[in-house]
Image: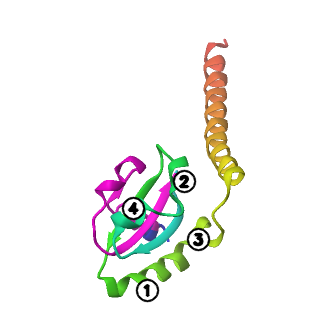
Amino acid sequence: MLVHWWRVFSLPHCSVAQLSHLPRCAGIYYVTAFGLIFYIGKAKNLRQRWQQHHRLAQFRLLAPFGRLHYQTLPAADVAVAEKRAIARYRPYWNNQRVPGFWGLWRLYWGGWGRLGTYGILGLAVLGVGLWRLGQP
């Protein structure tokens, strides 16, 4: 499983600000952030798809950590590849409707809140370690 996960994160990728750099060909894409795969989709034209994607607002909330990894494929192979990828990774956003304002708000604060919590815990551990170094 780790090998498959690594394959996704080694694919070409772009950030929210670079969506105009996506290729104009068919393929599947993976919305990722914090080492997690949030969404998997397919497109006949990757760049055009992301100019009007229904999950764009969610993707923007993941910035600056969100990435769009993509794999270009022949148009005939895209549907099968997407189904296999969804079955393998079971991304969270593929199984729920697009949230409204409050759902996006919870997602935003949930992600940043976790990051802040980990940061505070890291500082606490560092502080305790430094304090113990100063003890005789």
Please tell me whether mark 1 sits on a helix, a strand or a loop: helix
- Give the amino acid type for the residue marked by disc 2 in the picture: Ala
- Give the amino acid type for the residue marked by disc 3 in the picture: Asn
User: At 65% from the left edge and 17% from the top edge, which residue is drawn?
Assistant: 131
Labelled disc at residue 69: 4
Q: Within 10 angstroms of label 2, few (less than 14), some, or many (20 or more) residues?
A: some
User: At 70% from the left edge and 49% from the top edge, which residue is drawn?
Assistant: 106
Q: Which residues are magenta?
A: 5-33
- Give the amino acid type for the residue marked by disc 4 in the picture: His
Labelled disc at residue 37: none
Tell me which label, 1 or 3, sits earlier in the chain: 1
Q: Quadrant of residue 93?
A: bottom right
**Marks 2 and 1, Cα distance to the nearest angstrom?**
27 Å
Q: Is residue 36 left or right of residue 120?
A: left
**Marks 4 and 2, Cα distance to the nearest angstrom?**
17 Å
Please tell me whether mark 2 sits on a helix, a strand or a loop: helix
Q: Residue 51: percent from the left, percent from the top?
A: 40, 60
- According to the picture, the residue beneath numbered tag 3 turns out to be 94
- According to the picture, the residue beneath numbered tag 2 turns out to be 57
The figure's colour scheme reads rainbow
Please tell me whether mark 4 sits on a helix, a strand or a loop: strand
**Marks 1 and 4, Cα distance to the nearest angstrom?**
18 Å
User: At 42% from the left edge and 50% from the top edge, which residue is drawn?
Assistant: 16
Between residues 129 and 40, which one lies in front from this camera angle?
Answer: 40
- According to the picture, the residue beneath numbered tag 1 turns out to be 80
**Marks 3 and 2, Cα distance to the nearest angstrom?**
15 Å
In reply to whether residue 21 is colored magenta, the answer given is yes
Q: Within 10 angstroms of label 1, few (less than 14), some, or many (20 or more) residues?
A: few
Tell me which label, 4 or 3, sits earlier in the chain: 4
- Give the amino acid type for the residue marked by disc 1 in the picture: Val
